[in-house]
């Protein structure tokens, strides 16, 4: 009875896990709820990799239980002694080749998908991307629209069915820009720009967050992505220009000096004209011949800035 107890407990735990997991909905998990072509491509890659790994897991587990059952003590004669062998070239070749095949099967689609995701989605190749500069600071997000001439803090509005080219940099510690329902994450670093192309196919509100621990405000370093129809986005831009205060250099200096959480803010104009935009390091660019900008704030008064020490 005692020898059978562990098996019963194991089966009970497995059944309990299946029961609990049956209540989970993928629509509640942002990564498994893609709302754009970039996230959709990554979702299919996750599903493909999961299925492949599940097959490997099931085969290995089946072989394990087969060996345990076949060579159990009660199934063998009392004087049984296993045959002494010195390796098997066929088996050794098989269990060497199979892992290599598995790695290749995962690596090829992963590398191809990552390469494709650095470009504008094929279905939107004819559309001009909207460029938005993203600057992270402890612990806030600043979004600059150079074409529209506006700037927002801790929220960003984007049009649907149009590629968005985020130019990511940092005015402080390194962070990670991530909107799970629209695509994967990329880091923001000072004096460097990382390019991330995302797109939303449906209007809605999507939560973005910092995926890189960078201090006490990390857990609350969130922002909202509001995806709108192009006409609604145009109306929003018009409303901002007619009602928001003008961005002054002192406003921006005060904003990044404050080492802490701030609420939403909206301005007419951007801080980009006060920073050095000479070509510097650029990664993930759609065209490497088009250099990016660096976030050099050497010409600004940063004497009172808290760098998170």
Image (cartoon, rainbow, N blue to C red):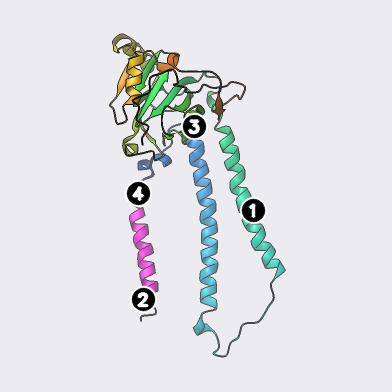
Q: Which mark is residue 37?
A: 3
Label 3, label 2: how far apart the Cα atoms are: 50 Å
- Residue at position x 33%, y 51% from top? 23
Callout 4: helix, strand or loop? loop
- Mark 1, Cα crowd under 10 Å, few <14 / some 14-19 / many 20+, is few
Count of all numbered marks drawn on residues in the image: 4
Query: On the rendered structure, is 115 left or right of 2?
Result: right
Q: Tell me residue 61's x, y (percent).
A: 51, 65
Query: Pointer 3: residues within 10 angstroms few (<14), some, or many (20+)?
Result: many
The secondary element bearing badge 3 is classed as helix
> In the rendered structure, which segment of residues is drawn in magenta?
1-24
- Location of the C terminus by quadrant is top left
Residue at 54% over, 78% down: 71
Q: Foreground residue, 34 or 274?
A: 274
Element carrying mark 1: helix
Mark 1 and mark 4 in contact? Answer it, CB < 8 Å: no
Q: Point out the frontmost of discs 3 and 1.
A: 1
What x and y, as percent, mark residue 86?
Answer: 69, 75
Residue 142, placed above or below residue 217: above
| Element assignment for label 2 | helix
Which circle's residue, 2 or 4, is located before the other in the chain?
A: 2
Whether residue 122 can be seen here: no
Q: Which mark is residue 5?
A: 2
Residue at x 55%, y 88% (from the top left corner): 77
Quarter that holds the N terminus:
bottom left
Q: Quadrant of residue 215?
A: top left
User: Which residue has dot 4 on it?
Assistant: 24
- For residue 254, which quarter of the picture? top left
- Estimate the x, y position of residue 244 in percent, counting from the top left: 30, 13
Mark 2 or mark 4, whichever is nearer to me: 2
x and y percent of residue 122 in the render?
56, 27
Return the residue at label 1: 101
């Amino acid at each position: 009875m005692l020898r059978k107890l562990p098996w019963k407990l194991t089966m009970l735990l497995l059944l309990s896990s299946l029961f609990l997991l049956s209540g989970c909905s993928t629509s509640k998990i942002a990564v498994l709820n893609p709302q754009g072509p970039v996230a959709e491509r990554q979702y299919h890659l996750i599903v493909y990799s999961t299925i492949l790994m599940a097959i490997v897991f099931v085969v290995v587990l089946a072989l394990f239980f087969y060996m345990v059952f076949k060579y159990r003590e009660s199934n063998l004669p009392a004087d049984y002694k296993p045959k002494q062998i010195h390796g098997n070239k066929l088996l050794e070749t098989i269990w060497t080749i199979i892992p290599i095949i598995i790695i290749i099967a995962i690596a090829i689609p992963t590398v191809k998908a990552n390469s494709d995701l650095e470009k504008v989605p094929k279905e939107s190749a004819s559309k001009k991307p909207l460029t938005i500069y993203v600057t992270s600071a402890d612990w806030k997000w600043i979004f600059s629209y150079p074409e529209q001439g506006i700037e927002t803090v801790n929220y960003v509005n984007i049009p649907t069915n149009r590629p968005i080219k985020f130019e990511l940099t940092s005015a402080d510690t390194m962070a990670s820009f991530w909107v799970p329902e629209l695509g994967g994450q990329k880091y923001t670093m000072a004096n460097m720009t990382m390019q991330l192309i995302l797109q939303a196919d449906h209007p809605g509100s999507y939560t973005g967050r910092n995926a890189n621990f960078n201090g006490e405000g990390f857990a609350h370093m969130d922002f909202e992505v509001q995806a709108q129809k192009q006409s609604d986005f145009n109306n929003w831009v018009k409303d901002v220009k007619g009602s928001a205060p003008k961005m002054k250099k002192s406003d921006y200096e005060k904003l990044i000096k404050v080492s802490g959480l701030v609420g939403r803010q909206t301005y007419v104009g951007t801080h980009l004209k006060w920073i050095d935009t000479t070509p510097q390091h650029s990664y993930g660019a759609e065209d490497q011949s088009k250099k990016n900008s660096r976030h050099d704030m050497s010409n600004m008064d940063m004497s009172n800035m808290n760098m998170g020490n």
